[in-house]
Image: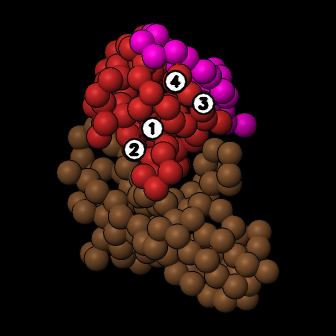
Chain colours: A red, B brown
Amino acid sequence: DVKVTQSSRYLVKRTGEKVFLECVQDMDHENMFWYRQDPGLGLRLIYFSYDVKMKEKGDIPEGYSVSREKKERFSLILESASTNQTSMYLCASLPNRGRGNTEAFFGQGTRLTVV
Amino acid sequence: ELKVEQNPLFLSMQEGKNYTIYCNYSTTSDRLYWYRQDPGKSLESLFVLLSNGAVKQEGRLMASLDTKARLSTLHITAAVHDLSATYFCAVGTTSGTYKYIFGTGTRLKVLA
């Protein structure tokens, strides 16, 4: 059974704190993604990674950074949390093209509130 | 730049009625995905469409893909309350690194 696990379901942090959101997948997928989901805006891509130590900016990278030191783990970092980063964060993983015509698998989401 | 647009954003319909959700995308892609999300839950995969003219059906939902028009549709037949959810389409890029972009979602409410 495929699995993408996010470290927390709910998180409350103070403005200015450094926040780490962790995502682990056990499917040996090359590609991992971080999205934020806000009402009326759908899922917006923050960053993605196609290999260990490789990363690319998505559509809304400002205020975020990422780390991929191991293939199975992709971390999203809020260097200095702000209230406009209050959102639902979703992690996903996907194998490379040619490794099967599969869809992306999602974690359960982390609802982050910055106060 | 890959952009994905869905419409409508909100859909309220009576049980037993039919309706179609549309997903347009801006650049070439050879695969399109449909997901369902229930409130407070993560995304659940519904369909993967891999070629022009592809059609897949599961229960009261049918998805199709026209790569020339860059359009996918999700058709709902004889809606039931259990189909109430938010539906997303997603498109993957065909070249370079694999970017995976979602539409804004369609919130469907089926009224009894």
- Dot 4 or dot 2: first in sequence order is 2
- The chain ID associated with circle 2 is A
Question: B57 or B89: nearer the eye?
Answer: B89
Is there CB contact under 8 Å for labels 2 and 3? Answer: no
Depth check, mark 4 against mark 3: the one in front is 4
| Labels 4, 2: front one | 4
The chain holding disc 4 is A
Q: Amino acid at mark 1?
A: Tyr
Secondary structure under tag 3 reads strand
Asked if badge 4 and badge 2 are on a common chain, one would say: yes
Residue in view at x 33 percent, y 43 percent: B99
Q: Chain of mark 1?
A: A
**Real-space CA distance between mark 2 and mark 3, rounded to the nearest whole angstrom:** 15 Å
Residue of label 4 = A114
Q: Earlier in the sequence, mark 1 or mark 4?
A: 1
First in sequence, mark 1 or 3: give its number.
Answer: 1
Instruction: Give the structural element (helix, strand or loop) at label 2.
Output: strand
Residue position marked by numbered label 3 in the rendering: A110
* Residue type of the residue flagged with mark 3: Thr
Query: What is the secondary structure assignment of the residue under circle 4?
Result: strand
The amino acid at mark 2 is: Arg
Asked if marks 2 and 1 fall on the same chain, the answer is yes
Residue designated by label 2: A44
